[in-house]
Image (cartoon, helix red, strand yellow):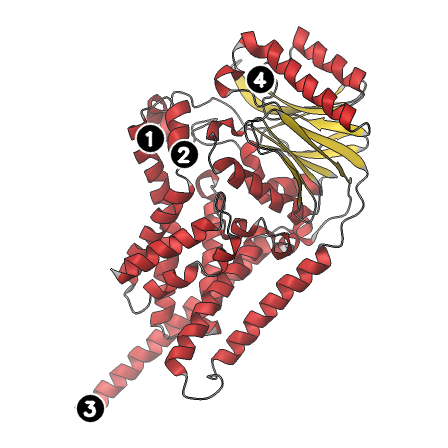
């Protein structure tokens, strides 16, 4: 019973570090009760405890999927619950594997640094696998729990969200190890010998986090270009009704003009994903109205709209797109969403999931864009992410590598209602700004819209379901961070290599123990 209480408490602690509670200090102790629950047990039981931990954590973090699927998937609320539980069960496999490996390392007699480092490495490698396996779902990664504490996340420009997560997990495990070793091994001396390197490592990690954080927070260049994120807050039930298109266009224009009046130096306005609920690529009255608006307001506009193309067989292929319009009313480029939402914008794995379409009537038939190129119109080179794409580090990285001097996220989070989901989603974009050292403008239909500095500071923030705009000056930056140049695969690979080496040492140790046992048995028989 005690182990289950510790498991539940641990999962709640980590959940409390995320929005909407957002008590980020909890992330640095959240795994301690979990580790205590894994003490002195067998690997199979460790797997079960890890699975329950994951089921608790992801159920609390992702509960908002139930009303979302029920409302927009057009299935009964009670049927939506098992759908979400299936997702949570899948996600729970990762902490279950981590718990199994943690127990294995402990049963091999490892402690101190020899326990803390491989255990932290296992967590991060599993997070990386979760970020890419089956299309990837990196929601709730450890590092995102501290997104609201900019000073703690500056090293993301070196090793991405995974490196920051490693530091948090390492501090959790080393704190547990320090307390465990002190209680078990203290014999009146100041410090047991094994604690000294552990404390030294903890101190080095903390010094690095805060010194690098303080240093990086003072690197931002003076912003020079005013940008606005326009949030029209169009109700999802009315958004696609053709009778409301004129109202939608009018509201975006009015809010943008208001932003222009309040900030005469405004150069660019960013409108959300599918803000224009019609095919902007087609010649139409609404398209011409927007192009003319850009000319009269003398603004760059980044807008969202669905689009389509034709396959080789003549079939229609739908895309989720963004268009950049210059102050002369010219369309300077189109970006097509590259990473689509599985079971939302498309059905993955072809015939394997074809049967499930009848349970998801609103699942789209979108296809992915082919190129990750920034949209360019002097002086802007905008790395655009549409909705779900903002949770994947490599998408923003690739666009900055190709010359993006500003990042933009356009999204429609109306699906999530007034839950924690819009805030969880918005916080992940903070890391994209820090990882690549770029200003980021996030425009959401119903919120959260915000402007984020390259140090991860949220300078302006919108409210949910309120028509408004948020504006602030940004800088168009050049240069590339270490993460932008080299990515994070090298860091994940180092952690994976460390795990392999640790497993190799464990296997050698077991072989030596078996040989020693046999020799001892032979000597006794003689």
Q: Residues within 10 Å of mark 1 (few under 14, many from 20)?
A: some
Instruction: Single out the mark in the foreground, 2 or 4.
Output: 2
Q: Residue at x 56, y 36 (%)?
A: 389
Residue 211, how many percent across, how many down? Answer: 68, 64
The mark tally for this picture is 4
Question: How far apart, in angstroms, are the residues tagged by discs 2 and 4?
Answer: 28 Å
The residue beneath circle 3 is: 524
Q: Residue at x 46, y 57 (%)?
A: 123
Question: How far apart, in angstroms, are the residues tagged by discs 2 and 3?
Answer: 64 Å
Query: Is 484 on the left or on the right of 187, as rendered?
Result: right
The residue beneath circle 2 is: 65
The residue beneath circle 4 is: 308
Q: Residue at x 34, y 21 (%)?
A: 358
What is the secondary structure assignment of the residue under circle 4? strand
- Lower position in the chain sequence, tag 2 or tag 3: 2
The residue beneath circle 1 is: 80
Question: How far apart, in angstroms, are the residues tagged by discs 1 and 3?
Answer: 64 Å
- Lower position in the chain sequence, tag 1 or tag 3: 1
Question: How far apart, in angstroms, are the residues tagged by discs 4 and 1?
Answer: 31 Å
Asked if the residue under mark 3 is in contact with the one under mark 2, i.e. CB atoms within 8 Å, the reply is no
Residue 240, how many percent across, how many down? Answer: 52, 14
Residue 423, how many percent across, how many down? Answer: 53, 39
- Lower position in the chain sequence, tag 4 or tag 1: 1
Image quarter where the N terminus lies is: bottom left
Question: How far apart, in angstroms, are the residues tagged by discs 4 and 3?
Answer: 80 Å
Q: Is residue 195 above or below residue 211?
A: below
Query: Is 130 on the left or on the right of 430, as rendered?
Result: left
Asked if the residue under mark 3 is in contact with the one under mark 4, i.e. CB atoms within 8 Å, the reply is no
Q: Nearer the viewer, residue 53 or 47?
A: 53
- Lower position in the chain sequence, tag 2 or tag 4: 2
What is the secondary structure assignment of the residue under circle 1? helix
Rendering quarter of residue 208: bottom right
């Amino acid at each position: 019973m005690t182990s289950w209480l510790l498991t539940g408490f641990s999962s709640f602690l980590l959940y409390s570090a995320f929005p909407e509670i957002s008590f980020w200090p909890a992330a640095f102790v959240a795994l301690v009760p979990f580790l205590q629950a894994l003490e002195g047990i067998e690997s199979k039981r460790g797997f079960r405890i890890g699975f329950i931990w994951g089921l608790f954590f992801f159920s609390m973090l992702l509960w908002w999927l139930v009303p979302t699927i029920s409302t927009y998937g057009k299935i009964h609320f009670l049927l939506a619950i098992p759908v979400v539980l299936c997702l949570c069960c899948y996600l729970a496999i990762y902490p279950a594997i981590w718990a199994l490996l943690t127990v294995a390392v402990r049963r091999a007699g490892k402690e101190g640094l020899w326990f803390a480092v491989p255990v932290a490495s296992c967590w991060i490698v599993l997070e990386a696998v979760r970020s890419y396996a089956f299309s990837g779902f990196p929601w709730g990664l450890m590092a995102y729990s501290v997104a609201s504490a900019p000073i703690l996340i500056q090293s993301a420009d070196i090793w991405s969200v995974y490196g920051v997560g490693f530091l948090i997990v390492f501090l959790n495990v080393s704190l547990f190890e320090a307390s465990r070793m002190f209680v078990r091994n203290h014999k009146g001396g100041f410090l047991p010998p094994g604690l000294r390197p552990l404390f030294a490592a903890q101190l080095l990690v903390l010094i690095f986090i805060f010194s690098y954080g303080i240093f990086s927070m003072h690197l931002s260049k003076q912003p020079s270009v005013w940008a606005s994120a326009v949030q029209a807050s169009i109700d999802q039930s009315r958004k696609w009704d053709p009778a409301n298109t004129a109202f939608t266009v009018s509201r975006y224009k009015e809010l943008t003009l208001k932003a222009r009046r309040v900030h005469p130096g405004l150069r660019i306005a960013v409108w959300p994903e599918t803000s224009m609920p019609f095919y902007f690529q087609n010649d139409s009255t609404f398209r011409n109205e927007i192009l003319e608006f850009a000319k009269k307001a003398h603004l760059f506009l980044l807008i969202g709209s669905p689009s389509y193309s034709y396959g080789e067989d003549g079939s229609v292929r739908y895309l989720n797109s963004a268009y950049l319009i210059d102050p002369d009313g010219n369309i300077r480029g189109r970006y097509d969403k590259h990473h689509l939402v599985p079971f939302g914008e498309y059905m993955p794995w072809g015939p394997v999931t074809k049967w499930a379409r009848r349970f998801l009537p609103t699942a789209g038939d979108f296809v992915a864009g082919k190129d990750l190129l920034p949209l360019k119109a002097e002086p802007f080179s905008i790395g655009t992410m549409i909705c779900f794409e903002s949770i994947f580090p490599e998408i923003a990285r690739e666009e900055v590598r190709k010359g993006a001097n500003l990042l933009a996220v356009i999204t429609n989070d109306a699906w999530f209602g007034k839950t924690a989901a819009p805030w969880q989603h918005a916080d992940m974009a903070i890391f994209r700004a820090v990882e690549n050292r770029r200003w980021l403008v996030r425009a959401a239909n119903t919120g959260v819209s915000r402007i984020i500095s390259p140090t991860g500071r949220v300078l302006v923030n919108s409210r949910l379901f309120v028509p408004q705009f948020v504006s602030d000056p940004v800088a168009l930056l050049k240069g590339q961070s270490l993460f932008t140049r080299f990515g994070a695969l090298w860091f994940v690979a180092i952690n994976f290599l460390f795990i392999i080496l640790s497993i190799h040492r464990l296997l050698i140790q077991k072989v030596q123990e078996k040989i020693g046992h046999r020799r001892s048995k032979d000597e006794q028989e003689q």
